[in-house]
Amino acid sequence: MKVSIQLPAPPSRDYEIVIDELPTIALEGKAVVVTNPKVAGLHLRRLLEHLDAKELFVVTIPDGEEYKTMETIEFILDRCFDHRLDRKSTMVAFGGGVVGDMTGFAASIFQRGIDFIQIPTTLLSQVDASVGGKTGINNRYGKNLVGAFHQPRAVYIDTYWLGTLPEREFAAGVAEIVKMAVMFDEKFFEWLETHDLHDDANLKEAIKRSVELKAWVVNQDETEKGIRAVLNYGHTFAHVIENFSGYGSYLHGEAVAIGMVMANRLAMALGMFGPEEAERVEKLLARYGLPTDYAIDSAEAFYDRFFLDKKSHDNTITFIVPERLGRFKMVKGPARETVLEVLAHYEKGRGREE
Amino acid sequence: MKVSIQLPAPPSRDYEIVIDELPTIALEGKAVVVTNPKVAGLHLRRLLEHLDAKELFVVTIPDGEEYKTMETIEFILDRCFDHRLDRKSTMVAFGGGVVGDMTGFAASIFQRGIDFIQIPTTLLSQVDASVGGKTGINNRYGKNLVGAFHQPRAVYIDTYWLGTLPEREFAAGVAEIVKMAVMFDEKFFEWLETHDLHDDANLKEAIKRSVELKAWVVNQDETEKGIRAVLNYGHTFAHVIENFSGYGSYLHGEAVAIGMVMANRLAMALGMFGPEEAERVEKLLARYGLPTDYAIDSAEAFYDRFFLDKKSHDNTITFIVPERLGRFKMVKGPARETVLEVLAHYEKGRGREE
């Protein structure tokens, strides 16, 4: 005999991304702010002035990808139990991508899931990490291999925090903005070519557009089976670059900038995207001091490394390339020779030579 | 400015609980069976004969509540990475409640969530753990404090495995069946009074009815804000009993049996449930060798221990009691004196004396 279990559709959840000066946020019940020592030192006082909670605690975790571990998750959870948080409590992620990922994952498994809100303090986390609900940790097998989909209750993006952000990290965030434009929105790309993101009003506009585009993508595909993969434009190459260079040489956004230029070259090799378009993308990235070239020792070794990535189920890599500005194309398993040819341009740093 | 994020409603998910001889199960992609040494020794061969997977691995975890830890989760995850499982792989939980909880939680966070199926081998896990999607681990702060809601893709209940189950564990499962009947279904209770669950056809019928009732409850309230709390009938007392006795003295179902009898007495003290009804419940439990009495050292100490439970947000305990057979009542914060009076019956084992 059988019993058919019909699970009720979970309630649809909406939330707001506020791109503005941080308002005063009222939190019911207890709250824990998770942050890192650098952000805390610079900005914790201002944050606390804007949080209105019954009881509030601060947990500081070390900064850096190498601390995106289960140990850090357990550290956060233990502090939450120490402070007797319950199912009605809220976690507040106050920092960049690492803090956001750690807080979101901890919130997703604390008593089987409690609310969290995001207050991202880097440009990258403001445009990238605040939409999509991905949380995760690294382990010795790779990055973000363990985690959960857990949506924040709200996201507050205040460009004020960026005042203390190093220029390189600012540019790394710009790379993700450019990525969204090249993939999905030609008009936005043209707008970026004519507007300086160091101007606060322009920056807010660009963050807003990026976030809207990402939300549009994610909404079509919450669990990354289709279009969400397009967000990996530049990333397939970037992961290998990061892998070869050792994490820490390049900021993630910098590796993505190089990766996008490589992907553009692959697009051209496949008969898409024109050299002028590729030039415009490179120029826009370079304007913010982003790297666009990279020296590969061996194209073959670089190629082989694609297949260590978690996204390759069946030894086929899907490359995301621009068909033209504002329109993406997913290319499943292009000929090995074609990819090697593109990579050969970069052997011994020849990427810029022709 | 603001961006409103409308999250798409996740697709509604249905699955089947098959109560029958285990069919051959076809699994796409790789699969990992998670089990414990005892179940593996007795039944792994028969299981493997019924699994049809491309590649199949077996992970054995130690048995017992004390191994429901994050370390065990990481052990399972590491083996899955060793065997290069990917997002299309499936985990198979083959064992009792501990194996089910651990496998479900590991599956929920492996690459942000993969499928798992349940093949419960104890009566308790067949009637209780196979519906509801609760997974979780214990830590030094308490039981099931960290975890996720993760629904199985399918559940296969085969009473064949129960052939090697010790009688005490069988009875512990019966306690959960009786619980469902007392709370929700008078007719089912009457049926239980006249049908021996040692008969396989009766047992399957009782499992089916329990599972249906639990599914009905869970469907109304997936995240335990309302009626799902009714499943805690007997458990509020049981947790304290387990806490005082040390885990391991009583099986969970045994503690629940005592807890139900205590809750019935509380119901009577509050003017509900008749002594005849209480007697019928006690008699049914006793028929399967379940304990219905318990010696409390101090009613006050027992009472205080309620408030260490995670479910008490604001120092109010909600007791679940039967109003009459088949109808539950949630009693929020009954007078301390009333509860103490009920507990006093059990001081020095006086529970049976009057």
Image (cartoon, coloured by chain):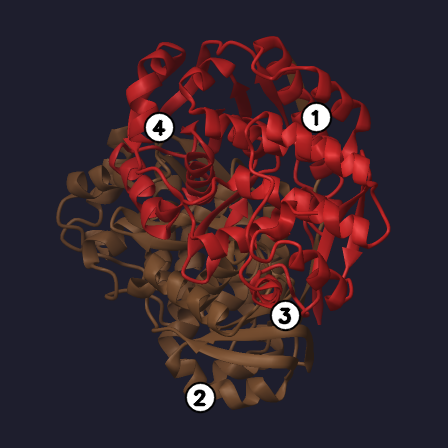
Chain colours: A brown, B red
Q: Is mark 3 on a helix, strand or loop?
A: helix
Q: Which chain carries label 1?
A: B
Between tags 4 and 3, which lies in front?
A: 4
Residue B140 at x, y percent in the picture: 40, 61
Kindly identify the residue that appears in the image at 32 percent across and 65 percent down: A67
For marks 2 and 1, give the CA distance.
Answer: 56 Å
Q: Which mark is residue A205?
A: 3
Q: How crowded is mark 3: few (under 14 residues within 10 Å), some or many (20 or more)?
A: some
Which amino acid is tagged 1?
Glu
Q: Which mark is residue B32?
A: 4
Q: Answer above or below: position of A56 versus B146.
A: below
Q: According to the image, label 1 marks what residue?
A: B212
Mark 3 near mark 1, Cβ–Cβ under 8 Å? no
Same chain? Circles 4 and 1: yes
Q: Mark 2 lies on which chain?
A: A
Q: According to the image, label 2 marks what residue?
A: A42
Between tags 2 and 4, which lies in front?
A: 4
